Amino acid sequence: MTSADANGVAIYSYCFPEDAAAAAMALEMTRMAVNVYSTSFGPYVHNSLTVVETDLNDGLETDGLYFLARSFYRAYAGGVQNNLADIAVHETAHQWWYGAVANNQATEPWLDEALATYSEHIFYESNYPNLVNWWWNFRVNSKNPSGAVDLRVYDTASFQGYVGAVYFQGANFLDALRLRIGDASFFAFLRDYYARERGSISSAAAFFAILDQNTTVDYSDLVKTYFYYR
Ligand SMILES: [Zn+2]
């Protein structure tokens, strides 16, 4: 186990001894992401955050701790253009979207997954602005995403279909929304949404109600394009 400090938040990284170099990167990405999201969204709600190398095949968030696939550590060959770095950032974002602001994971999974995925974009543009185009291609465009952002977990049996719609079309929607209403309103909205929904189980209704209090710009065509149930 190694540790780091993110402005008073203790970050712990557990790994198998042979994966120490990759674990150092997971620790550093987590530390940087806590700093970016504390500034962009609002303060982290715990005193520590732990990342654990494990043998499940992806990343998986819990509150104050997340798991990261051993395969990501084994494939790590340096740099931040890989799953180890990007999924570490994604699971860290879940501490804000899922951990602090909760949501119904079955009926409105986009509320945390679209925000966690787009939070990766916010991380890269803050720390590695020259890698934003890489991020879009690596994470979103290469998957040719389609489908309604507000798909329910019961609506598809396909994992590809699920993540394509909820995560990647979700990121496309949030980026289009940001472009439409402008950076100032978009980030004011995210901060407001976080401040008011933190500690509760949020909803799409709350998301859009708070959005409407932060912009007067008409974005209804984007909702028609990207959503099915609204
Ligand atoms: Zn996620």
Image (cartoon, helix red, strand yellow):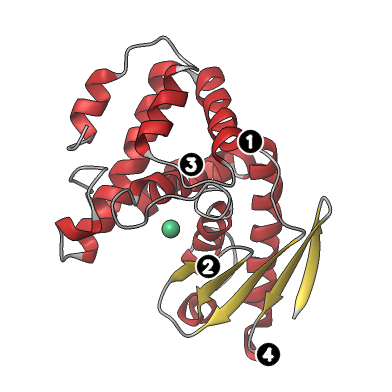
Q: Which badge, 2 or 3, is on the more N-terminal residue?
A: 2
The reply to whether callout 4 and callout 3 are in contact (CB within 8 Å) is no
Q: Is residue 227 left or right of residue 177?
A: left
Which residue is outermost to the top? 216
Who is closer to the viewer here, 66 or 45? 45
- Which part of the image, by quadrant, shows the N terminus? bottom right
Mark 3 Cα-neighbour bin, 10 Å: few <14, some 14–19, many ≥20: some
The answer to whether marks 2 and 4 mark residues whose Cβ atoms lie closer than 8 Å is no
Nearest-to-viewer mark from 4 and 3: 4
Residue position for label 2: 84
- Determine the secondary structure under disc 1: helix
How far separated are the C-alphas under marks 2 and 4?
Answer: 17 Å
Q: Looking at mark 4, is its residue's CB closer than 8 Å to ligand 1?
A: no
Residue appearing at x 64%, y 64% in the figure = 64
Using the image, determine if residue 43 lies above or below residue 176.
Answer: below
Q: What is the spatial separation of the Cα atoms under label 4 and label 1, in whole angstroms? A: 34 Å
Three-letter code for the amino acid on which mark 1 is drawn = Ser
Percent from the top left, x then y, of residue 216? 42, 9
Q: Which residue is disc 1 drawn over?
A: 40
Q: CA distance from mark 1 to mark 3?
A: 17 Å
In the image: residue 171, left or right of residue 48: left
Give x and y (percent) for residue 20. Answer: 68, 81
Of pointers 1 and 2, the one earlier in the residue sequence: 1
* Residue that mark 3 sits on: 132
Q: Could you tell which of marks 4 and 1 lies nearer the N-terminus?
A: 4
Q: Amino acid at mark 2?
A: Leu
Amino acid type of the residue tagged 4 in the rendering = Pro
- In the image, residue 173 lies at what x, y percent? 32, 34
Residue 126 x %, y % = 62, 39
Amino acid tagged 3: Val
In the displayed structure image, the side of residue 208 where residue 182 appears, left or right: right
| Callouts 2 and 3 close, C-beta under 8 Å | no
